Image (cartoon, rainbow, N blue to C red):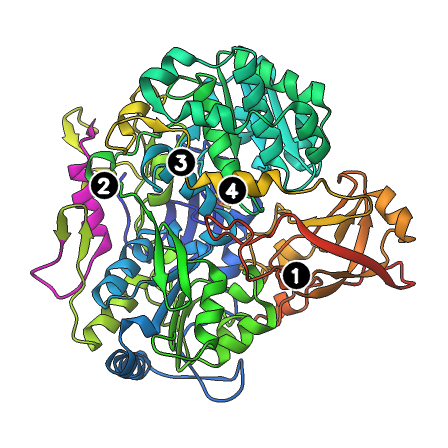
Amino acid sequence: MSQQSPHEDGRRATFCRICESFCGLEAEVSGGRIRALLPDGANPHSQGQLCPKGTSFLDVLYDPDRVLTPLRRTGGPGEFTPVSWDEALADIADRLASVLRRDGADAIAAYLGNPNWFGVSAAMSSQPFLAHFGVWKTFSSVTQDAAARLLASHILYGSAFRMPIPDLPRCDFLLAIGANMLVSHGSVLTAPLLREDLDAIAARGRVVVVDPRRTETAGRYEHIFVRPDTDAWLLGAMLNVIFQEGLAQLQGLAQSTVGWEQLRDAVQFLTPDIASDHCGIPAAQIADLARTFAHTPRAVAYGRTGTCRGRFSTLINVFICALNIVAGKFAVPGGWVFGDSPLEGAMPFPSGFEFRETRLGAKPYVGNNLPFGFLIDDILTDGPGRTRALIVASGNMVLTAPGGRELEQALDSLDVFVSLDLYVTETNRFADYILPCTTFLEREDIPLTGLAHMIRPFIQYSDKVIAAVGEARDEHDVWNELAAKLHAHLCAEIGNSRYCHASAPHFEPMAVMDALLRGGGVKVRDPAGVEQPLSIELLKRYPHGLTLADNLTCSNSWSKISHEDGRAHLWNALLDPELERMRATPVAGPGELRLFGRRAPLSINSWMHNSSRLVKSQFPSLMMNSADADARGILDGQRVEVCSISGSMQVSVTVSDEIIAGAVCYPHGWGHRGGWQRANATQGANVNELASKTPGDMLSGSTLLDGIAVTVRRIAEESARTG
Ligand code: SF4
């Protein structure tokens, strides 16, 4: 079956790009419109698995609130009028050129939101544009949920862009920390059959979930309650037990790592008793967990979002990697391994970390991301090099990043603010222009971000299923056009190669992908049985996707370490002050409450909250343990005020023993007041207003979102869930 053209009626194979699972979809097309999105049972990767967000995506595609023509701000926040693409791009180019002439590239910043990484068009084109004009002040959602993961990879493996994954299909003991895998569907992990994989592990061994809440994942498997933001104590103590009891694989450590003695000495103070005081897990259970982990041949520790949003996130992520390596679980089947990306041979893996000197002091620069709070300060602090222009692609920072009202004030004070988006959001209502972009159903793609994280190596090409709706354009077309108006010709620099198009002054990301695939070194058999290098042309002959291998190689993970000495570095002097900070941290006192976040199965940050079928059953509330509620005289459903040093919110309470005492939790991405009517009608508050713009994890510049100290007090006698 070959790919059909956009507008052709019939069933069209494609894949979802809302999250990292990249599940196979079939789109029912008639008359140029998609009538239904269905699971693709012929997709070998997802085998018909699909979550409700995937099938609900039609609500976004044909949403009457979707921005389908360029908008120019004409008044206060949220007041826009439609303009032509030419008019918008010409004015934006003039204004950017004027900022560049007056203040240079230091005065331009960019924020690339999470959806940027889920499609080739956006992921491949923003960087060439920014690099061409020397824009280095780049920000993203990474400092809200992944910077520590990247920094740990820089320390351990020599590149922030090398991220190991758990080899779930062959694992017998999975220790999942801060990861609600059944709801997130995997993060830094592409495994659309996750439930089946976890069930299979539980059937032959154990899945142990460490979380302050009995999440959907914890409830299905074994659960250990932990206090928010204390994973560093648990993991450090497990490492200590493994070293003290002779369970470390010392021969392997001596041969393949450096710094293991420093790591051993660093965690020596972390006895299970000390860790227990902090994390609330009994000392005997911590020691037993360490022993079981070490003794199980096919075991792996995996941590995700919850491990990246606390005060010691870099230490935690280093400890997770170290635990796997010290116990001999790295580069082995069922353990902690690097994926087998078909782009492996064509991609560079630079260090991805440095401290950048800025006009407001040195800042961590992790995977090209500065701490988010710096953006606010840089806009609002007068002086040479101050940010005056901001380009935001698919980012709704007002609901998903710290800063609250100060962030809004900063956004509204810019000379130029351009947003590429699908909606008028809480963030881009302050923009000068909103430029409408295509959804994944309107553009061609491969699952770029997932290629290195697939637990079963797989690749798929999808052509656009339908032509762009309205005047929406692919992101790369927008960056190209803007560059052209600024008299620039975009090229991608990847490793030592430069990808330009001599024949047309137009940067084509899919042509670059094709070159990378051909240069990646992977060969497969075409449908006629002839071996060929991977290419887009070849992939078009497999519309439901192509399985590249049944399992991960695993043993090649050591060879993928980017450090010059080829070894894993288990300690780095950067961690010394972090360890001291941790040692000086007191145990949480009685009555203290720590706020952390949670994911909802039908939400994906803030951006699908205009889908009625997804939000109609969602009523965000503050989850609180019954002991904490009783101590404050709070009943289920009552309204409360939650205060931190940065802000406050009024919400209703759900009293539940699904959450550990001493903590409260609330989902993020709510509190809508943009140009999306259904979202605006939802209940809930913007929990990120309680977050400080000062990083919680100093080393990675990550925002403190899990473990914010709060007070909660009842504000009204009201039992209905009204907010
Ligand atoms: S799990 Fe992710 S990729 Fe799969 S359908 Fe849901 S949102 Fe889409």
Give percent across and percent down for residue 605: 55, 55
Residue type, numbered disc 2: Met
Give percent across and percent down for residue 490: 18, 63
Answer few, some or many: residues within 10 Å of disc 1's Cα (few below 14, many 20 plus, some between 14 and 19).
many
Residue type, numbered disc 4: Glu
Q: How far separated are the C-alphas under marks 2 and 3?
A: 26 Å
Q: Which residue is mark 4?
A: 578
Answer few, some or many: residues within 10 Å of disc 2's Cα (few below 14, many 20 plus, some between 14 and 19).
some
Q: Is residue 345 left or right of residue 239?
A: left
Q: How far separated are the C-alphas under marks 4 and 2?
A: 32 Å
Q: Nearer the viewer, mark 2 or mark 3?
A: 3
Q: Is residue 102 left or right of residue 241?
A: left
Q: Which mark identifies residue 690? A: 1
Q: How far separated are the C-alphas under marks 2 and 1?
A: 39 Å
Residues 258 and 502: in front is: 258
- In primary-sequence order, the first of circles 4 and 3 is 3
- In primary-sequence order, the first of circles 3 and 1 is 3
Q: Are marks 1 and 4 in contact (CB under 8 Å)?
A: no
Q: Nearer the viewer, mark 2 or mark 1?
A: 1
Q: Which residue is mark 2?
A: 347
Secondary structure of residue under mark 1 = helix
- In primary-sequence order, the first of circles 1 and 4 is 4
Give percent across and percent down for residue 121: 30, 56
| Point 89% across, 62% down: residue | 718
Residue type, numbered disc 3: Asn
Q: Is residue 460 left or right of residue 528?
A: right
- Magenta part of the chain: 499-526
Q: Nearer the viewer, mark 1 or mark 4?
A: 4
